[in-house]
Image (cartoon, coloured by chain):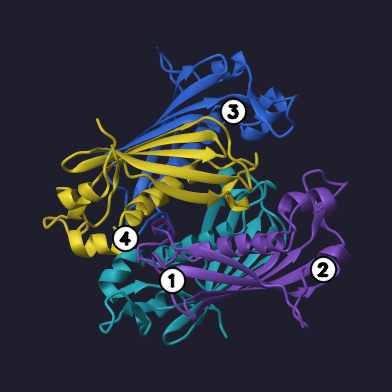
Chain colours: A cyan, B purple, C yellow, D blue
Amino acid sequence: MLVAVGIYKVKVQWGDCDGARIVFYPNFFRWFDEATRNLFESRGLPWVEMIDRYGTRGVPLVDARATFRRPARFGDALEIATRVTRWGSRSFELAHDIRIGSEVAVEGRETRIWGVSDPSNPEGLKAGHIPDAVKALIPAEPA
Amino acid sequence: MLVAVGIYKVKVQWGDCDGARIVFYPNFFRWFDEATRNLFESRGLPWVEMIDRYGTRGVPLVDARATFRRPARFGDALEIATRVTRWGSRSFELAHDIRIGSEVAVEGRETRIWGVSDPSNPEGLKAGHIPDAVKALIPAEPA
Amino acid sequence: MLVAVGIYKVKVQWGDCDGARIVFYPNFFRWFDEATRNLFESRGLPWVEMIDRYGTRGVPLVDARATFRRPARFGDALEIATRVTRWGSRSFELAHDIRIGSEVAVEGRETRIWGVSDPSNPEGLKAGHIPDAVKALIPAEPA
Amino acid sequence: MLVAVGIYKVKVQWGDCDGARIVFYPNFFRWFDEATRNLFESRGLPWVEMIDRYGTRGVPLVDARATFRRPARFGDALEIATRVTRWGSRSFELAHDIRIGSEVAVEGRETRIWGVSDPSNPEGLKAGHIPDAVKALIPAEPA
């Protein structure tokens, strides 16, 4: 079974770390966001095209979670492997595994909606149907 | 039953928001971290004293989670109510409820360890016993 | 001579500091941005009204500078005093003095344009005339 | 005349941008900091070795400045060219040119000290002599 996996690499910078010289943990969620966009892009869906071709205006979060198995330090080379674990009709779930060398440092999970313009609220987004073409380009893990 | 609740207020700044003009979600975890320290401080446990009095070197994360119920926008006044939901012997759990006015916008959960110096690894931390005095100062939710 | 001075207070958070346990310096510019908006708001010009009343779409930077006189550390209470040092026809200059207690820690300078929509480029901004009403509400330093 | 130039590449991420969908400007200073470390590393001076070999504890800022010539947007590929413009005995100056394609978007300048431990203040740093070996490895612009 084919599952699309995006690989996103991050080198931990001095400014990513706190006074304990380990990554200040909200940065991992920043990298999850970057890794999500990287997965789409690696499958031929750069963000700008997604807006033009499919009318999506963003993929806002419903839920985000991370389990921290070991700290990451200044200079560490992180490899983030991202896959879709479930496509719903209007939402989808992602898993992000962050490895340092062969060790898993962080395991992340996100649930996002497929955001489209909300005619009743120009400032707002609502959850729209995820196009089948997008699901086909990014095969999810089997249930 | 007394439960200690720390209140931490944040006004959403322009730079906290992304191109959709809602809070870029990793910032909520940054505010959870600030709200955690604020809870300790509001109970007479400023961080510097915790280092001197109890030898703690930090409270690193084991797990963090957030559920997003509605977006927060530039200028919104957030009120974060933080409480300890469980004191273990070496770890503890926190809940953070973020309200905008009377509406809950985000619900957060964190599990942290009580970090103390690790003599076998000068760079590292290990989980130490949480002092009873600390637990007494910050009454947790009843189980 | 009356000069409008906005006071913006920041308590240095753990996540604002780097591995040397001093503020990671880009954060000072983040606070300059917040202090700029705070000055306008303190003079009766909240950002949302500026959009509606005066059509401004932002005040993007042309130049920014900071001189660092002493480090700021976790827990320090910063007081940022912000004033306009020059109103031009389409741009303006600000000074931000950051004090810790009675000591000046950082001196900042920004030059910003008055951004308005650019009909020839829907994504872009161009420099527009600064309304006299705005200049009157925020008296600048005498030249 | 040989001048050492470090090249540091950044792809602008969604979370780097603000509600105007351009880079929130403090991020440029974050990238200057990363580009400074990258220059040292590209010349055989990774940060960890600098601590061990030369006793430096950091290169804190005295002054930082940026001139913004055009905005950078989500997805832009930035190339930051960094060089030392002056080696003093205890401080040094850097220039950072950020290009998008062939256009200069931002010009940055930093003045930093060579930080060493301060025996009279365990929390502090003081400016120490910059080793000649470091200056030789990173030839500066001729005066």
- Tag 4, which secondary structure? loop
Circle 1 crowding by C-alpha within 10 Å: few under 14, some 14–19, many from 20 = many
Above/below status of C6 relative to A5:
above
Q: CA distance from mark 2 to mark 1?
A: 33 Å
Question: Which mark's residue is nearer the viewer, 3 or 1?
Answer: 1
Q: CA distance from mark 1 to mark 4?
A: 17 Å
Q: Give the quadrant of residue C58.
A: bottom left
Which of marks 1 and 2 precedes in the sequence? 1
Q: Which residue is mark 2?
A: B135
Where residue D40 appears, as percent x and y from the top left, is 55, 29
Question: Which mark's residue is nearer the viewer, 4 or 3?
Answer: 4
What subunit carries mark 3?
A: D
Q: CA distance from mark 3 to mark 1?
A: 45 Å
Where residue A55 appears, as percent x and y from the top left, is 28, 75
Question: Which mark's residue is nearer the viewer, 2 or 3?
Answer: 2
Q: Which of the pair A82/D95 is nearer the observer?
A: D95
- Tag 3, which secondary structure? loop
User: Going 33% across and 77% down the picture, which residue do you hit?
Assistant: A124
Hey, which residue is sitting farthest front in the picture?
C1
Where residue D45 appears, as percent x and y from the top left, is 60, 28
Q: Which residue is mark 1?
A: B72
What subunit carries mark 4?
A: C
The disc label shown at residue D44, or none = 3
Q: Which residue is mark 4?
A: C46
Circle 2 crowding by C-alpha within 10 Å: few under 14, some 14–19, many from 20 = some
